[in-house]
Amino acid sequence: MADKLAILALLLVLSFSGCNDKSNAKTSAGENASNLTREIKMADILEPIHGISFEDYAQMAMKLTSGASEEQICKAMGIDSAVWDEVNTLWTQRMKEDATFKLVTLYGQYWSAGVTNPKLANLEANVSPEGKANLERIKTDRYFYEELCGARNAAYAYGLDGAQWILENFGITLGDFQSVAMQYMSKRANGEEDIVETKEFLEYQQEKQKEYEAKFAAQRGGDIAGDIEF
């Protein structure tokens, strides 16, 4: 879709240029200069920070939310914690200041692709056998994935940290869960899932959320953050 939009935009620019006469030469030159400035700014915004590219940064963040420690990640990338703190701060700042949302789009694409940097790919978080089994299951069992989405939403609704609750009860880290979520989102975006299927999955998720909310309500007692076992 992005490629089609880019082609359409190019055709519109070419058509506009072809129908203008010499009286619009200054305007065209000004637009070209403006486009060049935007390209330069985009090149600047993607300039690595302390040798860490934006793709590297996204993958480091992914590993961090997947249970790998900051120490492990920094060691793998050959930097210390002080450098990581600055890298994290500055890339986050760039994303906030990027009015084109190019960085946000790229960030989502990198998460969808998973960790490909060989320095990071082999980092293993301390995940239980049950957690590994559940992670593999949500990758292939869409209904189980939707159930856990519903459970997480129910936990948030009752004042709990839904991501932490999923980790404690199913052994799946936030990073791993979001990585799977991005894969399912990509399937929808690429037309691999039709609207009927999407509606069915959403209704199932909502149904499961109500079930988990009922369980939370029955066991919350006077402390909504108390131990809840399923």
Image: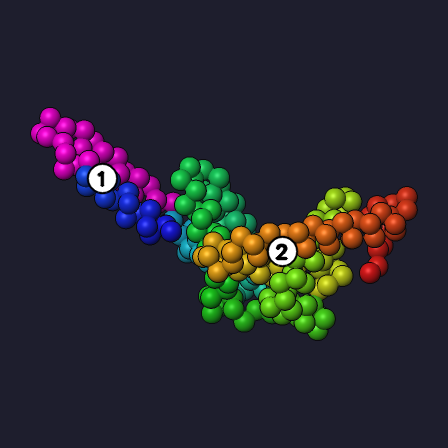
Residue 63 horizontal side relative to residue 9, left or right: right
Under circle 2, the secondary element is: helix
Residue 120 horizontal side relative to residue 100, left or right: right
Q: Position of residue 176 (x, y in %)?
A: 60, 61
Q: Is residue 111 visible?
A: no
- Check residue 125 for magenta coloring: no
- Check residue 41 for magenta coloring: yes
Of callouts 1 and 2, which one flags the residue occurring earlier in the amino acid sequence?
1
Under circle 1, the secondary element is: helix
Residue type, label 1: Val
Do the numbered discs 1 and 2 sit on residues whose CB atoms are within 8 Å? no
Residue 12 horizontal side relative to residue 183, left or right: left
Q: How far separated are the C-alphas under marks 1 and 2? A: 42 Å
Q: Please give the residue where the numbered disc 1 appears in the rendered image.
A: 13
Q: Residue 184, relative to residue 13: is it above or below? A: below
Q: Residues within 10 Å of mark 1 (few under 14, many from 20)?
A: few
Look at 63% across and 70% down and name the residue there.
136
Disc number placed over residue 99 in the picture, else none: none
Q: In this view of the protein, which residue sits in the foreground, 157 or 116?
A: 157
Front label number (1 vs 2): 2
Q: Position of residue 158 (x, y in %)?
A: 78, 45
Give the quarter of the figure containing the C terminus: bottom right
Q: How many marks?
A: 2
Outermost residue toward the right in this view: 222
Q: Is residue 22 visible?
A: yes
Range drawn in magenta: 16-45
Q: Position of residue 111 (x, y in %)?
A: 51, 57
Q: Please give the residue where the numbered disc 2 appears in the rendered image.
A: 201
The prevailing secondary structure element of the residues shown in magenta is: helix
